[in-house]
Image (cartoon, rainbow, N blue to C red):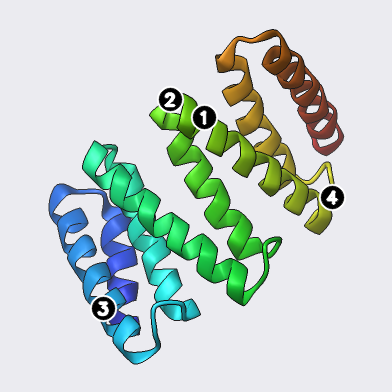
Amino acid sequence: LQSKNNLAILLDEEKTPESTAEAKELYREVIAGRTEHYGPRHVETLTSKMGLANLLKSEQTLESAAEAKELYHEVIAGYTEHYGPRHVNTLTSKMNLAVLLKNEKTPESTAEAKELYHEVIAGETEHYGPRHVKTLQSKMNLAVLLKNEKTPESTAEAKELYHEVIAGRTEHY
């Protein structure tokens, strides 16, 4: 199963229609095998679900986005149960889902994405610090979402975040 998972990762990186189709098939086989062997919430199973979700997100179709969203929710729940809500793997899963939701551009998906971005920023600030590159990138992602909402409140919050990002990046570079 590990070899199939590794091959799926390699094929996904090639980004051709053929390699993507094969990678999807391999991820599904690995997820089925790991679910049967370890269970649906085991870290190995969740890791493969995350790989498939990332692949599906990159396809940018409604069908693949819906499946990716479902997988991200499963992964977040499993990682939260296994590691806790502020673990790096949990935060990465939340960030991936937030990006997918942001791109849907519906009021519901935007609200959920905003909530996830705030959770990720809080966790990264706690884990890495407020001026770490990962924290700053998450703040930038949230600022872009808020800017696109075009309300006085979201614009004010976006400006604040942009100032934090600029100050942090100025320190680093």
User: Which three-letter amino acid code belongs to the residue tagged 2?
Assistant: Lys
Position of residue 105 relative to residue 171, above or below, is: above
For the residues labelled 2 and 4, say whether their Cβ atoms are less than 8 Å apart: no
Distance from disc 1 to disc 4, alpha carbons, whole Å, reads 26 Å
* Residue topped by disc 3: 32
Residue in the picture at 74% in, 53% down = 123
Q: How far is the residue under mark 1 from the one under mark 2?
A: 6 Å
Residue located 78% across and 46% down the image:
132
Number of callouts? 4
Name the secondary structure under disc 3: helix
Contact (CB < 8 A) between labels 3 and 1? Answer: no
Discs 1, 2 touching: Cβ within 8 Å: yes
Residue type at mark 1 is Thr
CA gap, disc 2 and disc 3:
32 Å
Q: Which residue in the structure is indicated by mark 1?
A: 110
Question: Which of labels 3 and 1 is toward the front?
Answer: 1
Q: What residue type is labelled 3?
A: Ala
Are discs 1 and 4 less than 8 Å apart at CB? Answer: no
* Residue denoted by label 4: 129
Find the distance from the CA under tag 4 to the CA under tag 3.
38 Å
Residue 105, numbered label? 2
Mark closer to the observer (4, 3): 3
Depth check: give the residue in front, 100 or 13: 100
Q: Which of marks 1 and 4 is nearer the N terminus?
A: 1
The answer to which of marks 2 and 3 sits earlier in the sequence is: 3
